[in-house]
Image (tube, rainbow, N blue to C red):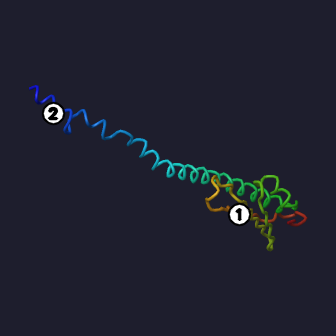
Amino acid sequence: MSADRGTSGRAGGAGSWGVRERGSFTAELAAGLPALMLLLFAGLTAVNAVTTRAGCLDAAREAALAAARGEPGSAAGSRYAPAGADISVTVAGDRVTVTVRAPVRSFGARLPRLTVSGTAVAAVEPGSPGPLP
């Protein structure tokens, strides 16, 4: 029995497992950390894009309703639009179409630049002085 105890620690026994695996967690973390950071930045950018698009839709809706009532649509839309948004008001017959485009701030310098938009259409209200862009 004493011979078994002496060889189990040296040649592939339970004692040598910890020595062979030493530092493997650090190596795996170093290899996986850049991928995790990229996923984090992409996820934060996606959440920011969804939030910015919701702001564009709100601004387009408000601008379309204001223009349909005869008020300046772009002024009403700029109160609700995200920072740096471009507001386009188009009047065609008895319909007002508003498109709001805004850039999305991306987390990370190397991620692609995104632009989101929101569009709303409203009918001109009867008896109003006429739609104003």
The spot of residue 78 in percent (x, y) is 82, 56
**In the displayed structure image, the side of residue 74 where residue 28 appears, left or right:** left
Q: Which residue is mark 2?
A: 7
| Furthest-bottom residue in this view | 93
Numbered disc 1: secondary structure? strand
Comparing 62 with 85, the one in front is: 85
**In the displayed structure image, the side of residue 43 where residue 114 appears, left or right:** right
Numbered disc 2: secondary structure? helix
The spot of residue 2 in percent (x, y) is 11, 25
The kind of residue tagged 2 is Thr
The picture quadrant where one finds residue 11 is top left
Comparing 17 with 89, the one in front is: 17
Image quarter hosting the C terminus: bottom right
Q: Residue at x 25, y 32 (%)?
A: 15
The spot of residue 14 in percent (x, y) is 23, 34
The kind of residue tagged 1 is Thr
Q: Residue at x 79, y 73 (%)?
A: 92
| Furthest-right residue in this view | 129
| Furthest-left residue in this view | 1
**In the displayed structure image, the side of residue 78 where residue 35 appears, left or right:** left
Q: Determine the CA span between mark 2 and mark 1.
A: 76 Å
Comparing 127 with 76, the one in front is: 76
Q: Which mark is residue 103?
A: none
Q: Which mark is residue 119?
A: 1
- First reached walking from the N terminus: tag 2 or tag 1: 2
The picture quadrant where one finds residue 124 is bottom right
The spot of residue 83 in percent (x, y) is 77, 54
